Amino acid sequence: MVERPASVVKELVENALDAGAHAVDLAIEDGGRQTIRVSDDGSGMSREDAVLSIERHATSKIRSAHDLVGVRSFGFRGEALAAISSVSQLELETATDDGAGTLVRVEGGHVREVTDAARRRGTTVRVARLFYNAPARQKFLRGARSEWRAILDVVGTMALARRDVRLDVSHDGKPMLNLPAAASLRDRLAAIHGGSVAGRLLGVDEVSGTTHVAGLVERPADVGTATRRIFLSVNGRAVRDIGIVRAAEAAYRSTIPGGVRPTLFLEVVVAADMVDVNVHPAKAEVRFRDRWQVEQTVERAVRRALGTFDAGATFGRSVWPAALAGTAPAPAEPVDVESLQPTTTTSDGLFAASDSASASAAALPEASRPVSDIPPLIQLQRTYLMFEHEHGVVLIDQHSAHERVLFEQFMRTLECGEQPSQRLLFPMTLHLGPAESEAFETHRELFERLGFEIEGFGGHTLIVRAVPMPHPRFDPERCLRETLATLTGDRETGAHARHERLAATVACKAAIKAGDSLSPGEMRALFVALRDTTLPAHDVHGRATIVQLTWDEIERRFGRK
Ligand SMILES: Nc1ncnc2c1ncn2[C@@H]1O[C@H](COP(=O)(O)OP(=O)(O)O)[C@@H](O)[C@H]1O
Ligand SMILES: [Mg+2]
């Protein structure tokens, strides 16, 4: 249980927090191998309690069976001080509001001295020469730097969980962290890791029933560019919980490449009787009464944060205005795009097919947004759409953007309906290689749902009689060939995963390309269609569709700020 200096620090700080401290001061020497001193301004202890506290099972934290339900305090085992004092030279100095102060000196578990001590309310525990009497364990201590890093890790995590508490940490006499009580997670993060890290993260905030998920998560465009950090708290207590992390990661599906993992700072609050955080105090695992509901809320919360234009790549700190960012409707499932229909203002050729596809679905309020809130758009290099905004300049990659639009449209089709198609005047004949033919056979039914009407013609020849028409420049033959070539050898088994794979491939092949010149109406149509997707700021390969350059950053670069 007492494995290394960092675990001692953790126990002592938790005790201080349990005692209601508003400020905790840590002084560490030699990575905690020489001394660990933790002072707090909490309740303090009477002399009797102080002496008792270092005996095994000395906890004061369970007074009745009722306390075992929804315990909010950190530990109730009543063993930490006993265990620590048995392998160190420990001094405990404490005073309550009224009583006189007490000093207890313990060596290797034996109380050597109990005397008066003059001090203000609170407790200071000083642990010196950890494992001095347990050479086998001392041997396993790492170097001072490594132990110090582990301590910083523990303190950083607790500092995030309890940002209402002031924390000061010094190492070998040098101040290392000074964290005043912070009003927000972002402020606390900025104090620990610096403002540039904190400023780039996206805010998360979602309530579902009695579950509240808040926090900060990494922009998909930034994932993989810096050290990954994970912080998770449940009801104010830092925990590890792989299920919640997985749920948050699931929200990133189709916005980041496989193999990279996002930085996440998430705070979950649930009703006290819905959770048992004391299942395994050392491992900090959590047992929820309704885990599925909590994970669903986490995934939805993160997905919503990613589902705004603001979630795109940014130079400088993002200040995307709520007016534009707030258009993402509440997504319920990873790819619940059923409720997201293209707007009626987009029938400008480019999205004619998607308009008729949506005819049967109920229009959402978002769908009737007036055309007037579309900013003037300029096409650059026949590749990017640019517009200016109150807070900066924004670039949209037309291919990536269209790919995102088509991907969601195709997913909607594959999972919930049929795509209208256009009969070809002259059926098209395709000769395929064996691998492509096999890929076609595997996905045949899905191709049909996407609007392809295809007949096998024996051997490796296909006759295509009808095709979907996502936009006037669509080249069905090329799309089909390239899609089949990409799907060759595809062994995706789950239905949803197969749909995603096919939708992403066809979207990529069917989308307008860089170099296609767009009419003003088509640019507007693309803008609106993109804005109405669930994840407008990301294409389906983990790249940004949108990059913004804020006026702030521009002014900074021109030395105006
Ligand atoms: N910093 C502190 N301020 C006030 N009381 C403390 C402090 N540290 C320890 N105690 C008291 O000592 C008891 C034993 O502490 P510990 O061994 O960590 O067990 P636990 O925290 O599991 O109860 C606590 O229950 C508490 O009453
Ligand atoms: Mg404790």
Image (cartoon, rainbow, N blue to C red):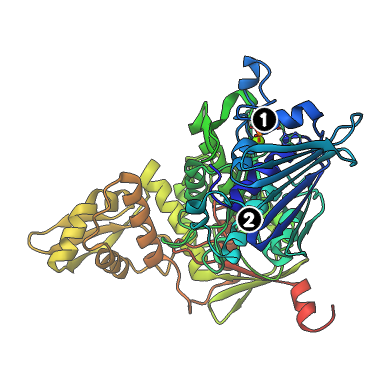
* Residue 256 visible in rendering: yes
**Camera-side residue: 527 or 17?**
17
Image coords of residue 507 (percent x, y): 40, 61
- Mark sitting on residue 151: 2
* Residue 207 visible in rendering: no
Q: Can you tell me whether the CB of the residue at mark 2 lies under 8 Å from the nearest atom of ligand 2?
A: no
Quadrant occupied by the C terminus: bottom right
| First of labels 1, 2 by sequence position | 1
Image coords of residue 226 (percent x, y): 56, 67
Image coords of residue 536 (percent x, y): 56, 58
Q: What residue is rendered at 34% in x and 53% in y?
A: 421
Q: Secondary structure at mark 1?
A: loop
Q: Residues within 10 Å of mark 1 (few under 14, many from 20)?
A: some
**Camera-side residue: 259 or 13?**
13
Vertically, is 108 above or below 442? above
CA separation in Å, label 1 and label 2: 23 Å
Q: Return the residue at label 1.
A: 72
Q: Give the amino acid at mark 1.
A: Arg
In the picture, residue 93 is in which quadrant? Answer: top right
Q: What residue is rendered at 64% in x and 54% in y?
A: 129
Q: Secondary structure at mark 2?
A: helix
